[in-house]
Image: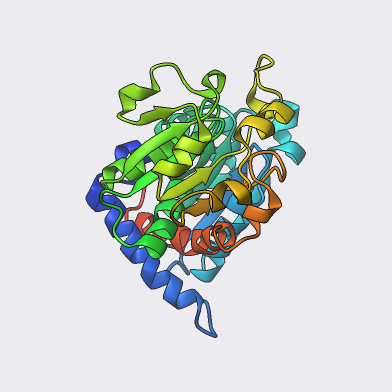
Amino acid sequence: TRHLLGIKDLTEADIQFILETAENFKEVINRPIKKVPSLRDITIANIFFENSTRTRLSFELAEKRLSADVVNFSSSNSSVKKGETLVDTVNNILSMKVDMVVMRHSSPGAPHFLARNVKANIVNAGDGTHEHPTQALLDAFSMREKLGDLQGKKIAIIGDILHSRVALSNIFCLQKLGAEVMVCGPITLLPKHIERLGVKVELDVRKALAWCDVANVLRIQLERQQIKYFPSLREYSLYYGINKKMLEELDKEIVVMHPGPINRGVELASDVADSDHAIILQQVENGVAVRMAVLYLLAAVKA
Ligand code: CP
């Protein structure tokens, strides 16, 4: 494929190949000299129409470690504010001899629209509530690093599933790798008919924690809520917030993950987020290697 738009489009073999390539790049970026010349003839534009810390910096570092030339674009201080369209914006950037576009956008499907209308490899860095494929890949990479093969492993995704692109991409990715997936959250924050995706549904966070090998914890995405959803943050933290005591009551050790940004004291207490249970910063570390793998593999297939 010329693009990475979503995990839904990938086969298990594609995912395995990306993760194996990422293992090699992780070894590379732990060397004293972290850079390889693989993409020295490629120019990449990171275009962000929505805020980001991890994804944006991680893509930029991945590109620089691969020796690509990099330009960064934020819609908030661009001529989008003067009314320029997405396709015009990207075509203007491409006319400066840019080869690949990494895009984050608040509208589900925006990268798919772009892929049909411009001549460049497109990487989806998160499109609204739809998909965040590189997050799912780095999550799977991090789980594999901790637990080995994911076949038969039990992963609970806990939180605001309704507004989460991380949840959907994780569900597709983990199922393709043979894991069992559960979603857990208040019924108001679970998509209708989510069970049709083949996931278990659990409303009780303690039961989800007792079932799983890995808890992937998500934040409440207030910025995506069109109407005021129940519960409030205070109620959410009371009924669904995960703290150390809850983990100590389990008869086993589980791995705690979070894609970030964390709302400390809401979905995760600091005594969990900063504990040895959590691999949150390892996820961020692995994001660079995984994104290097994605860019390296796509660059071989010119648009
Ligand atoms: N996990 C993630 O996508 O974080 P950012 O929104 O900071 O990129």
In-front residue for pair 116/96:
116
Q: Residue at x 71, y 24 (%)?
A: 232
Is 263 above or below relative to 61? above
Farthest top residue in view = 227
Is 141 above or below relative to 24? above
Where's residue 166, x and y in %? 49, 39
Q: How many marks?
A: 0
Where's residue 150, x and y in %? 31, 53
Where's residue 230, x and y in %? 65, 18
Where's residue 54, x and y in %? 62, 53
In-front residue for pair 209/280:
209
Q: Quadrant of residue 155?
A: top left
The answer to whether residue 110 of the structure is visible from this angle is: yes
The answer to whether residue 95 of the structure is visible from this angle is: no
Farthest bottom residue in view = 32
Q: Residue at x 61, y 49 (%)?
A: 245
Q: Residue at x 34, y 65 (%)?
A: 21
Is 7 above or below relative to 236? below
Color style of the picture? rainbow
In-front residue for pair 37/34:
34
Q: Quadrant of residue 237?
A: top right
Q: Is residue 161 left or right of residue 265?
A: left
Q: Is residue 51 left or right of residue 137?
A: right
In-front residue for pair 252/143:
252
